[in-house]
Image (cartoon, rainbow, N blue to C red):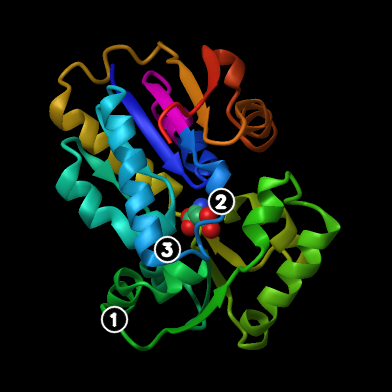
Amino acid sequence: MSLVGVFDSGVGGLSILDEALRQLPQHDYIYLADSANAPYGEKSSEWIAERSLELCRHLARSGCDAIVVACNTATAEAIKQIRDQVPIPVIGVEPGIKPASMQTQNGVVGVLATEATLKSDKFNALLATLPNDCRFIKQAGAGLVPLIEMGEADGEETLELLAKHLEPIQDAGADTIVLGCTHYPFLRKAIRKLLGNSITLIDTSDAVVRQLRRQLEQFKSDEGLNEERHGSVSFVSSKDDAPLLKMARDLMRSDLNNHALNSSMLDSQ
Ligand code: DGL
């Protein structure tokens, strides 16, 4: 079995961990939330890159066999440096604009992500590879991450702010929205409430976990032999671990009772 580190600025990466526990429950996980510093999306590129690298080094030192950078913002700003400097497989996440361009019926796609992700060279380079018969309406979701961090994903204030952010996307007639931040899958219900069920929502967690599986299979030949096992999950927070564990129970669909759980504070700042 492998030990997998999953890292995000806060609770967003729980959307990826949830999918990982569904597809690959047999592994052990460390979920690292840098909640003391969330949100990352409005911070400088340099800060995000340095902090993300530091935390991935910490996960590698903790014995992880692979790391999922479960944060679009950290992936956009730091994945190259992390891959260069951390000697284990590192899987990143990026907004699913390519699958969105293939699924849209009318060629208008909204991209909801953090300001840092939308401004990043990595995101814009990805955008440039897509055929220009698809129009992307880019919208920064300023203020949404702190509300989700406070457990308010379905709250009134979140709905109001979200409605404002979705307006340009709605006005352009988009039939598809890319959830380009790992916090945003937790807004599914709110988005459906505002825009209805016909809008297609693109979330890449399934593809990210399939990529993790491929990476793990490359260096562990015993994969698949212990499908019955349910591994442990350690929740580590740079702020306060008890609320992180509570949020995980509230936000995730996986039955965490099937796993040995523990929580702690990050010991290397
Ligand atoms: N969950 C993160 C992302 O995917 C970061 C959000 C933030 O901290 O601003 O971009």
Disc 1: which residue: 128
Q: Mark 2 or 1, which is nearer the eye?
A: 2
Q: Give the range drawn in magenta.
A: 20-31
| Mark 3 and mark 1: Cα distance apart in space | 14 Å
Residue 64 shows in this picture:
no
Disc 2: which residue: 38
Choose between 174 and 7: the one closer to the eye.
7
Disc 3: which residue: 95
- Return the disc, 2 or 1, that comes first in the chain's sequence: 2
Classify 10 Å Cα crowding around label 1: few (below 14), some (14-19), many (20 and above): few
Q: Which residue is drawn at 57% across and 65% down?
A: 200
Q: Residue at x 53, y 21 (%)?
A: 264
| Mark 2 and mark 1: Cα distance apart in space | 29 Å
Choose between 89 and 81: the one closer to the eye.
81
Please say if 262 is above or below 196: above
Check whether the beta carbons of the residues at disc 2 and disc 1 lie within 8 A of each other.
no
